[in-house]
Image (cartoon, rainbow, N blue to C red):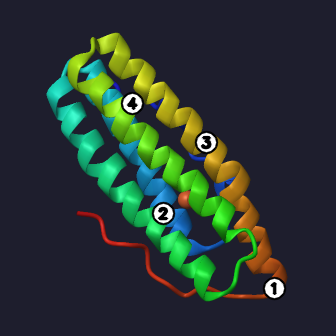
Amino acid sequence: MERKEIIKWSKDFETGIKAFDDEHKFLVKTLNDIYNLLNEGKRDEAKELLKRRVVNYAAKHFKHEEEIMEKYGYPDLERHKKIHEIFVKTVIEKLLPKIEEGSEEDFRSALSFLVGWLTMHIAKPDKKYGEWFKEKGIVIEEEAVEID
Ligand SMILES: [Fe+2]
Ligand SMILES: [Fe+2]
């Protein structure tokens, strides 16, 4: 089956910090992988991937961003942290049960939510810290967090 993309990497997503751009690219790829598994009728595999990569990997990615923001005194850290926290809570309390027990349509609507959230989050608050680091002339030479 031809591979399709539900979310496309765009220049608008670039924060200018390589580690974070790599992590975001991996999240984008994961959402596309889940989408393609669903299209192939492999719902269980899609579910597993979502739990492993969206829940666990996203948590690692958020922590990584927060650590770097904290290290350099990013002024909007608390608000950014809160946004991450609400997202994780929503995924665990609302999305996962819906995916576990719901229909394929529920799964697809959960995936749409994830695509919308990620697009908006990278393009707005994440890009904002990218601009701040750039303005301050801070170069982050970190590596992306490891993919399991
Ligand atoms: Fe991010
Ligand atoms: Fe973020």
Disc 2 beta carbon < 8 A from ligand 2?
Answer: yes
Name which residue type carries label 2: Phe
- Closest to the observer, 7 or 68: 68
Instruction: Name which of mark 3 and mark 2 comes first in the sequence.
Output: 2
**Do the residues under discs 1 and 4 have CB atoms within 8 angstroms?**
no
Q: Which residue is mark 2?
A: 62
Callout in the foreground (3, 2): 2
103 versus 89 height, above or below: above
Q: Earlier in the sequence, mark 3 or mark 4?
A: 4
Identified by mark 3, the residue type is Thr
Label 1, label 4: how far apart the Cα atoms are: 38 Å
What secondary structure is marked by label 1? helix
Whether residue 1 appears in this view of the structure is no
Q: CA distance from mark 1 to mark 3?
A: 25 Å
Name the residue located 71 percent from the left edge and 78 percent from the top edge.
Answer: 74
How far apart marks 2 and 4 lie (CA) works out to 19 Å
Q: Which residue is mark 4?
A: 94
Asked whether mark 4 and ligand 2 are closer than 8 Å, the reply comes as no
Amino acid under disc 1: Lys
Quarter location, residue 21: bottom right
The residue identified by callout 1 is: 136
Of labels 2 and 4, the one closer to you: 4
Q: Is residue 4 visible?
A: yes
